[in-house]
Image (cartoon, rainbow, N blue to C red):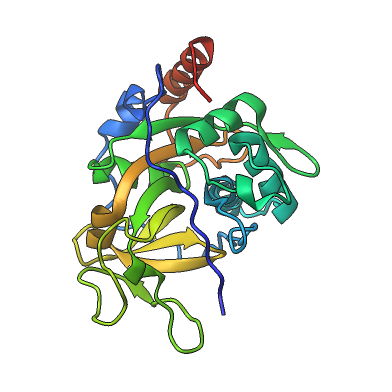
Amino acid sequence: MMLRKLGCRPAERRARQPMLTTMKGFMARRAPQRLIRDGIDPAPLMLGNDVLGNCTAAGIGNHIRATAALAGYQVAVDTPDAVRFYALSTGYVPGNPATDHGGVEVDVLTTALQQGYALARQTLFPLWGTLEPADLNAIRNVTAGLSAAYLGVQLAVADMWTDAVGNPPPLWDTPTPAGRGDPTPGSAGGHCLLLWDYAGTADTDVVTLLTWGTRQKATWRWVRSRLMEAHGLAWRQLLPAGVLSPTHQDWDALVSANEAYLAGPQAV
């Protein structure tokens, strides 16, 4: 039986928060109609999200792994790495359940930008920026060009349903089958997950989400109904070059936006 915790607190905004609209050429593109990555294994890991509400930290660790997979190799990210970063970015005290309150995505991303995501052999520093959650073309551009989109969703109790042996639904969709509990978005709580690929752009086309150490299928209409925030992470030291990658001008714009953010006041 798969144990699953949540842990994404309500979406917030910060002063001078980097926005991916600064990458004008990259964001103005028409995203690919299909993004099929069946032959690439992003190798997502649970990273402690079965016992802790550390999905925001686990999401960054799995974003590192997804990005590396596109370049044909893998980066070791362990549960202690994710728990250590969860403590650094949220105030969680390891071993003290009373401090396990989840994380605000923008604050978790700010910590990664400022202090890095420490692994056993290296510390990786992402650039990042926020997207308007209603802009699905922008979310697809980020998925295609920056390896995966970092999302905050409001899960329903029905999404947490498992069968008699503890397996989750093979597909998240709306409407939800009867008998699975409250279908209201947010009735279960907030969760951080990654968008990895998609079979098309229609409401009923299927996407692949990386969460809880596995690939979860969902429809675009499910994503639209649950989405509360969306961000792009960029690991310049990991991301392979490709036709869908940002241009040098767009990279420079993202660097400038992150530098401006660090130079201003943040409440973390």
Horizontally, residue 179 falls left or right of residue 142, namely left
Q: Can residue 78 be seen in the rendering of this structure?
A: no
Residue drawn at x 54%, y 36% as measured from the top left: 108
Measuring from the top left, give residue 94's x and y in whole percent: 72, 47
Horizontally, residue 217 falls left or right of residue 173, namely right
Q: Can residue 91 be seen in the rendering of this structure?
A: yes
Residue drawn at x 56%, y 59% as measured from the top left: 42
The quarter of the displayed image where residue 203 is located: bottom left
Observer-nearest of 202 and 1:
1
Horizontally, residue 192 falls left or right of residue 73, namely left
Measuring from the top left, give residue 82's x and y in whole percent: 66, 48
Q: Residue furthest right?
A: 121
Above or below, 259 relative to 196:
above
Figure quadrant of the N terminus = bottom right
Horizontally, residue 128 falls left or right of residue 48, namely left
Residue drawn at x 31%, y 26% as measured from the top left: 21
Measuring from the top left, give residue 70's x and y in whole percent: 55, 52
Above or below, 35 relative to 263:
below
Observer-nearest of 49 and 100:
100
Observer-nearest of 191 and 33:
191
Q: How many marks?
A: 0
Q: Residue furthest front?
A: 98
Above or below, 158 relative to 73:
below
Measuring from the top left, give residue 119's x and y in whole percent: 74, 43
Observer-nearest of 51 and 231:
51
Q: Residue furthest bottom?
A: 164
